[in-house]
Image (tube, rainbow, N blue to C red):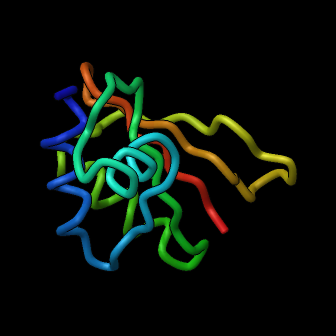
Amino acid sequence: MDSSGPLLETIMKLEPPVHVFGGSAEDALLYGRSVRTLDDVDVLVGREELEAQLGNARASGFSSHEVRFEPIEGMPMVIGTTDGSRDLEISVV
């Protein structure tokens, strides 16, 4: 199993809840577990929840974040954050 397992456990306890998608979600849906090494865990959050979720990420050890996609200034759509060994990518709707 890859290092996303403990991160997924943390993510599933977040309030407000997030929606996991991408490779982690595919593995869970198809196999019921992680079956491959993944570079990151992708989550989807509502724009109104973004600050709360960035706070959750900081509380979980993700102290550094960067805007990875921002088509309209001041309205990021993808924010990446890392704790040094794991990468969490937050997509905003």
Where residue 15 sits, quadrant-wise, is bottom left
**Going 44% across and 67% down the picture, which residue do you hit?**
19
**Going 22% across and 46% down the picture, which residue do you hit?**
33
**Going 86% across and 48% down the picture, which residue do you hit?**
71
Q: Is residue 85 left or right of residue 76?
A: left
Above or below, 19 relative to 3: below
Number of marks in the image? 0
Q: Is residue 27 left or right of residue 4?
A: right
Residue closest to the eye, 93 or 48? 93
Residue closest to the eye, 41 or 77? 41
Above or below, 15 relative to 64: below
Q: Name the outermost residue toward the right.
A: 72
Q: Is residue 10 left or right of residue 39?
A: left
Residue closest to the eye, 64 or 69? 69
Where residue 11 sits, quadrant-wise, is bottom left
**Going 41% across and 32% down the picture, which residue do you hit?**
40
Residue 27, given in percent of the width and then of the height, sits at 37, 45
Above or below, 87 relative to 47: above
Q: Which quadrant: the N terminus?
A: top left
Above or below, 80 relative to 45: above
Q: Is residue 62 left or right of residue 65?
A: left
Residue 70, given in percent of the width and then of the height, sits at 77, 46
Q: Which quadrant: the C terminus?
A: bottom right
